[in-house]
Each structure stands twice: as structure tokens, then as C-alpha cells.
Image: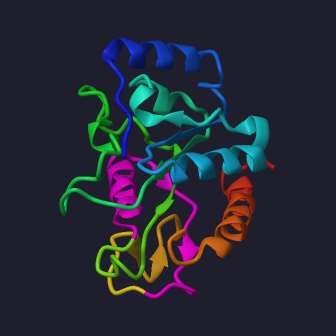
Amino acid sequence: VGFSLHRTDEARVAMAHVGRGACAPVGLYYSTGTLRTRKVAHMIKERLGDAVSEPQLIRSALPQQLSEHAKGIICGTPSYLWSDHQVSALDWDNVVPPYTNPTDMDGKRVAVFGFGDQKSYAKHFADGVGIVWEKMQMRGAKMVGTTEVDGYEFERSRAVCNRTFVGLVLDDDNQPELTEERVERWCAQLKKEFEIE
């Protein structure tokens, strides 16, 4: 499942968002396949308030927007992959730093959230979260928003570093009853880490 926008439509959407909080202290960008990521993005916005921009599809963002936010950005990703090295139809693979400034996110805080299915994809659980995290780290970002792996059962995940998830990992396929609680707890954590309390 995905979305199809012509380039002119994407540009129109992007320009509309410039006037709707693109320069909020923290930007909130996501990609989605089943709309779950969008739903959580709006949950995060509700909990963090005006310090965070309106949730925006990453494919409709202007290239310079990510580094314009004073404190950093929050990135959302769906659960699945087309291949071992490319995140599904996220469009995150097309989000690259300016050629003249490969570390454009230097000094910015970045937090990542996303979905996985720990039973059906136990060997690739929430890999999308790890891939986006890796990309942002390469751009010089200070990564925040890590969470504990306790309460999950899986074999491998690129979202794990030093026995900790690099972001917020959700599993609506097997643990939907825990999603709201996990988002609530993560947002409280981000208020401190982004210093937006």
C-alpha cells in the first residue's frame, strides 16, 4: 500500500507545510505503508504540542527542511523492507544530504520510531528503524530516543545497538495494546532529550 503523487503535487504539499510549522524547534517526518506510522506521528504531535511541527510525509519535504529545525527531528518508518539494504517504499532512501554538506545534521538531535512484526519477521524485526537511524547518524546527527528491548521476542534487528533499541519500536500485529503506553513513555523521554519541556 502506498501513495502516488506527481512532482507538482509534492511541491505544492511541501510549500504548504513551510507555513505550517516547518521551522518548529523539532520537525516530525514520516513515511507510511499502512497508515500506522501516520497515526503514531499524530499521537506524538498531540503529546509534544507546539514544539513539534505538524506531521509531514518525508517525500513532500523540501531538501533543506530537515536541518532547519533548531533542535532536530523525529523520523517515522514503517516495518517492512524490499531488500536487505533498502527501506521499503518509505522514501527515506531518497532523503540525502546536500552534496556540498554531507553532515548537514551535525549537532541536531534525531529520534526514530517505527513498526515491526516480531513473529513473522523475527530475523528482520523493525530493521527500518535501524536503517533510518544509521542514515541520520552518518549525517552527523546526535541520536536520541533509545528504548529497552525488554518485552519483545525476536532473533535479530538492525534497530538494536548495544542491547538497546535505537528508537521507539512498535508492534501493532502482536502487541497493539502496548502501543499507546509505549508512545506516551517515549514522548515523556523526548521532552527531556530535546529539551522542550
Foreground pick, 56 / 103: 56
Percent coordinates x, y for residue 151 in the rendering: 57, 86
Q: Is residue 34 left or right of residue 69?
A: left
Residue 110, visible in the rendered structure: no
Give the residue at x 49% y 53%. Answer: 142
Give the residue at x 67% y 62%. Answer: 183
Give the residue at x 40% y 75%. Answer: 161
Percent coordinates x, y for residue 28 in the rendering: 57, 40
Q: Check if residue 128 falls in the magenta segment.
A: yes
Q: Which residues are magenta?
A: 126-153
Percent coordinates x, y for residue 80 in the rendering: 33, 60
Toward the right, the furthest residue is 197
Above or below for 64 versus 175: above
Percent coordinates x, y for residue 62 in the rendering: 42, 22
Give the residue at x 45% y 27%. Answer: 61
Residue 21 quadrant: top right
Q: Is residue 31 left or right of residue 131?
A: right
Toward the front, the furthest residue is 1
Above or below for 112 versus 71: below
